[in-house]
Image: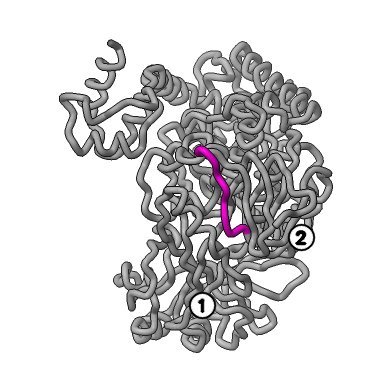
Amino acid sequence: MGYLENKFDVIVVGGGHAGCEAAIASARLGAKVLLCSLNLDNIALMPCNPAIGGPAKSTLVREIDALGGVMGEAADATYVQMKILNSSKGPAVRALRAQSDKKEYMRYMRNVIESIDNIYLKQCCITELIAKDGEITGAIDEFGNEYFTRAIILTTGTSLDGRIFIGLNSYRAGRLGEMPAIGLSDSLRKLGFNVKKLKTGTPCRVDKRTVDYSKMTVQPGDEKLHFYSFKPNRPVREQIPCYLTRTTEETHKIIKENLDKSPMYQGLIHGVGPRYCPSIEDKIVRFASNPSHHIFIEPEGLGTYELYIQGFSTSLPADVQVKMVRSLPGLEKAHIIKPAYAVEYDYIPAIQTSHSLMTKKVKGLFCAGQINGTSGYEEAAAQGLLAGVNAYNYVNGSEMLELPRSSSYLGTLVDDLVTKDIEEPYRMLTSRSEYRLKLRQDNADARLTEIGYKVGLIDDLQYNIYRAKQSEIKREIEILTETKLPATDENNQILAQYGEHIDRGIRLAELLKRPNITYETIKKLDYNADIRQLSEDVTSEVEVLIKYDGYLKRQEIQIEQATKLEKYKIPDDIDYSKIQHISTETKEKLAKIRPKDLAQASRIGGVKPADISVLMVMLGK
């Protein structure tokens, strides 16, 4: 069946965080984009926690902004609370977290999409992909309408053949109250893809009018605001608090008595769940010696009385959920608006894709978000942005954008996905990056703005702001390196407040390297610092660059050594079975993942340094 206006440069399947960034990126670069969603009223929905950011994830959000994406500015425009986490720890693990107004966030993203003339919205379910000679040519929806294109980006979230579980009851759905995407999984299998299942879940939502906050600990936002976007003039909004309560002995008893009604413990769910966001029944069983667990009560927005019960994900029956919730201090009379549930869905293990997020089996087919085996809005959005850029590049015959691990958390995320045979939902953690001191949230613009500008997603205004900031940072480091502080009584009186003393003159940069000294201390000692009127973004980065200079230089040496292996490119058509002096297991892993260079090969689990040496000699010849 034909369809009017059915030719597009890029088709994006799914309107979640990955789909939004993918569609916006491709369209802003000039592609004619069709964005297909099962429900257009749920574009950019936060189906789980009402928040953006957190450890490692905040770095991803800032990287998205530095590359020209939208999530950061949307989070800044719609927050109800901003908070810096791990503020007392080192700069590699400090993280911004925004509680978001879920409805406002969706409206903001929808407005951005509808402001771009070459994005066309369509409420439909794509059920079949069309490929010819190993290349995408189109797609078909549930009504039989055919769409022609050279590039498709799959961002299906949990909808792909999704099934929801509440107790021992289950039904087909991708999210509560939304139909699943049926048919597409079979189409992917016909194209030769290995399709597997994963599991995730979400807590119940309760009515705040039935909650007693006096029995909980208040968790306010920060008085001093920080933002995700590097753009100027971020909005100052009303902040509302979160609250902290804990599970009780009664909570644990209820859960243990009802494990026989858990679909997970009864073997009804076969997909592996997220390791770092387990259900509450999983926590009780796995950490049996722990008498209590933190539970955070989070607002879903300014215009609703729905509260999110963070840390209380479950798939136990609805009547059991009522007992569980009412066993928590402050929630004894809580009314549940929406029950918690688990959802099992299809995904494509990402070792079947390349670093550009284009699949290896079918050219022009890209995957981003949970279909690649990840969890989290931020991981999805970052992948969506990269896939959107590369779908446009593919259609226009341009070079693919591939980010190395040393450049970003996004580069680390993608490399882990396409190199390691991941069998559980992947979550970005600071510990996943061996370069985490370099890849901080504060310097995402320094690492990626040039790339975003070259790609075409960063406009002149943001680029000039970035250049001016880098110039200020460079100049301030020069001033602190050149300025010598005399050992006067007045200066030592100030230093004594911080447990420090100097016997002779010292350069300000050397003084700043001391653990007890911050840039605020330097401002008290160097009266010209106030005259320079530098922003906190500049001074905080100056402090990190000076204080951690030695560690940063060591990481640069690490990166340089790793880069040497990247120069050894491995031919696509290499026959690993014919290589001598490496084990059969190693040959099978190399043939399965087909690394592009020795650096990637060295990161494959089970591949030994001796194997890399053999490959290096072979490639050298």
Relative image position of residue 431 (x, y in whole percent): 41, 42
| Residue 43 numbered tag | none
Q: Badge 1: how crowded within 10 Å, few (<14), some, or many (20+)?
A: some
The mark nearer the N terminus, 1 or 2, is 2
Residue for badge 1:
171
Against 165, is 318 above or below?
A: below
**Discs 1/2, front:** 1
Against 611, is 617 above or below?
A: above
- Does the magenta segment cover residue 130? yes
Pick whichever, 397 or 503, lies toward us. Answer: 397
Q: Is residue 329 visible?
A: yes
Relative image position of residue 600 (x, y in whole percent): 38, 30
Q: Which residues are magenta?
A: 126-134
At horizontal 70% and vertical 39% (from top left) the residue drawn is 9
At horizontal 41% and vertical 62% (from top left) the residue drawn is 273
Residue for badge 2:
104
Position of the N terminus, as image quadrant, is bottom right
Name the amino acid, label 1: Tyr
